[in-house]
Image (tube, rainbow, N blue to C red):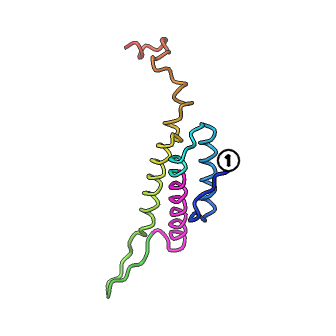
Amino acid sequence: MEHKPKREIKDRAAKKLFDIVIRELEIDDNLSDRTIMITDNLALLEQLKQQHLADIKARGVVELFVNGSQQMYRQNKSVDMVIKIIEHQRKLQAELKLTPASDRKVSGVVDPEGGDKGDEFTGY
């Protein structure tokens, strides 16, 4: 079944992220209404992130702020927003089990019993 992002998602990078996440969820057989909703949220966050990155590119990391006769430079608020969006996207990816730490393939390789008996530190 073909899944499409929400109508509000117009950014190319956000649509590409939606397709990648849907494809990964199909591989893991983890596609449901809930995961599609989370994927839409990931794509919307990506769209916002791209808008903030465009603002940073246009105005720079710092901007001139004029308050009456005072002039000062202050940080572009888009920089903080990009960092917050990335953190939130990471949380949603973890919820979908799409981060390296939550990847069952990686965690399945490690022997929880400490299979390496030759290391003297392991015996300690």
Look at 45% across and 64% down and name the residue there: 79
* Furthest residue toward right: 2
Q: Residues within 10 Å of mark 1 (few under 14, many from 20)?
A: few
Residue at 67% in and 51% down: 2
How many numbered discs?
Answer: 1
Point out residue 107 in the picture as x, y percentages from the top left corner.
51, 29
Magenta segment range?
Answer: 39-61
**Does the magenta run of residues contain 58?**
yes
- x, y percent for residue 109: 55, 24
Residue name at image x 63 percent, y 38 percent: 27
The one nearer the camera, 98 or 26, is 26
Dominant secondary-structure state across the stretch colored magenta: helix
Q: Residue furthest bottom?
A: 69
Location of residue 7 (image quadrant): bottom right
Up/down of 57 relative to 32, above or below: below
Q: Is residue 53 magenta?
A: yes
Image quadrant in which the C terminus is located:
top left
Name the one closer to the observer, 103 or 33.
33
Helix, strand or loop under label 1: loop
Q: Which amino acid, by three-letter code, is at mark 1?
A: Met
Q: Residue at x 49, y 36 (%)?
A: 102
Q: Nearer the viewer, residue 37 or 48?
A: 37
Q: Where in the figure is residue 54, as x and y percent of width and height? A: 55, 69
- Left or right: where 62 falls relative to 17: left
Give the residue pinned by disc 1. 1
Residue 15 to residue 71: above or below: above
